[in-house]
Image: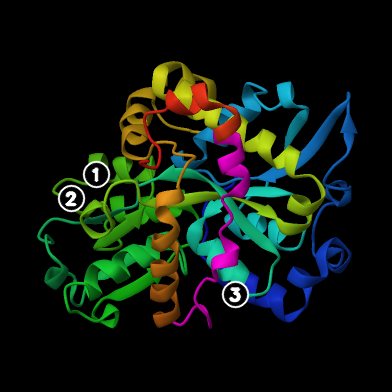
Amino acid sequence: MCERCGNTYHKIQEASRRGFLKGGAAAAASLAIPAGLMSPGMAAAQGLTRIKATHGGGLCNLGIFLAKERKLAEADGVDLDFVVTPTTTDVVTLFGAGMVDVSVIPYSNFITLVDAGAPVQIVAGAGVEGCILIGSEGISSPADLKGKTIGTFQADTLEVLPYDYMTSAGMEFADAEIRYFNTSPELAAAFINGAIDAVSHIEPYATQCLQERAGSTVLTDGLDLYGAGYSDCVLAARTPLLEENPDAVKAVIKAMMTAQYQSETDTAAALATTQGTYYKTSLEALTLAQSRQPVMIDQRNNSDFFLERSVSMQKMGYVKETLPDSAVNWTLLEEVISENADLYDSLNLKTAA
């Protein structure tokens, strides 16, 4: 299972400089990727179209996990084939270089990929909310973070959150000391063990941090900054796939929408399907975490949010340009909604009409 990691941004920049992101699979051949992953992203498998996908390790991936485990795309002719990677760096590199077809990734990684020249587009949402900034005992406001250490991942949604939290209060991000970590478990452990004063993390790790470090408190869960339903992760697809086989992408979107319905109507069963295989935590902790970071496939309400966060990332020095309108493409999502009205109407979380 892939975890978020701290050097994704640098890997994207390196891949961009070396031409991998624009050169596609042929250019990516010189990357250190196992030979088995070099097969075409779409191949016939028992009469199905095989779509290679990557994912992260947080609760925002629950929709694609359920789609895979319950084979929810097969009814529409698609075999969802996970390419397992150890870190988010590998996820983003493979996706950006064209080694996989679709990916559930943090919106921040998507923004840096687009800025680096990768031909990718957001086609649907994945998970919302669940990005949580936690302070240790004695830290309860932006001002309390001055001179303190904040642990996070570089150029990630989890760095954008404390940046927006501090700057919205009139502070400079440089007022705190930012420490970058390589994996989700490592980041959580650093906070729990007292190595850092504050942590910006995703679920289910944020819940673990709160439960295992006495006196810790939530500084922001993003809701006060961004409003309900703000995005953490998105479903993105390669532009060539969108042009060559839009029906396959629609099958993945529909499968994830079905997964959202299943997670909303029988949360316990959905988590039981994924616990152990994808989430290494107790069912109790997982249930609480899922309530804080639910699946939401229709994220059309987040179009402005993506642009605004790209402005933050530009100010942070991570991208040269803000996100272009063409990078967010809801066309196939809207077709799936139109063609599956009963399913869509049954969803709890969706963009307000």
Q: Position of residue 58 (x, y in %)?
A: 47, 43
At 78% from the left and 27% from the top, the residue drawn is 77
Q: Gap between marks 1 and 2, in whole Å? A: 6 Å
Q: Quadrant of the C terminus?
A: top left
**Colour mode of the rendering:** rainbow
Q: Nearer the viewer, mark 3 or mark 1?
A: 3
Of callouts 1 and 2, which one flags the residue occurring earlier in the amino acid sequence? Answer: 1
Numbered marks: total: 3
Provide the residue designation for mark 2. 216
- Residue 7 vs residue 29: left or right? left
Q: Quadrant of the N terminus?
A: top right
- Residue 256 vs residue 149: left or right? right
Provide the residue designation for mark 1. 210
Identify the amino acid type marked 3: Asp
Quarter-of-image position of residue 22: bottom right
Q: Which residues are magenta?
A: 317-337
- Reply above or below: 275 against 145: above
Q: Gap between marks 3 and 2, in whole Å? A: 36 Å
Give yes or no for contact between labels 3 and 1 (Cβ–Cβ under 8 Å): no
Front residue (pair 341, 107) = 341
At 53% from the left and 83% from the top, the residue drawn is 320
Determine the secondary structure under disc 3. helix
Front residue (pair 297, 51) = 297
Front residue (pair 305, 162) = 305
Q: Nearer the viewer, mark 3 or mark 2?
A: 3
Give yes or no for contact between labels 1 and 2 (Cβ–Cβ under 8 Å): yes
Identify the amino acid type marked 2: Ser
Quarter-of-image position of residue 316: bottom left
Circle 1 crowding by C-alpha within 10 Å: few under 14, some 14–19, many from 20? some
Of callouts 3 and 2, which one flags the residue occurring earlier in the amino acid sequence? Answer: 3
- Residue 241 vs residue 299: left or right? right
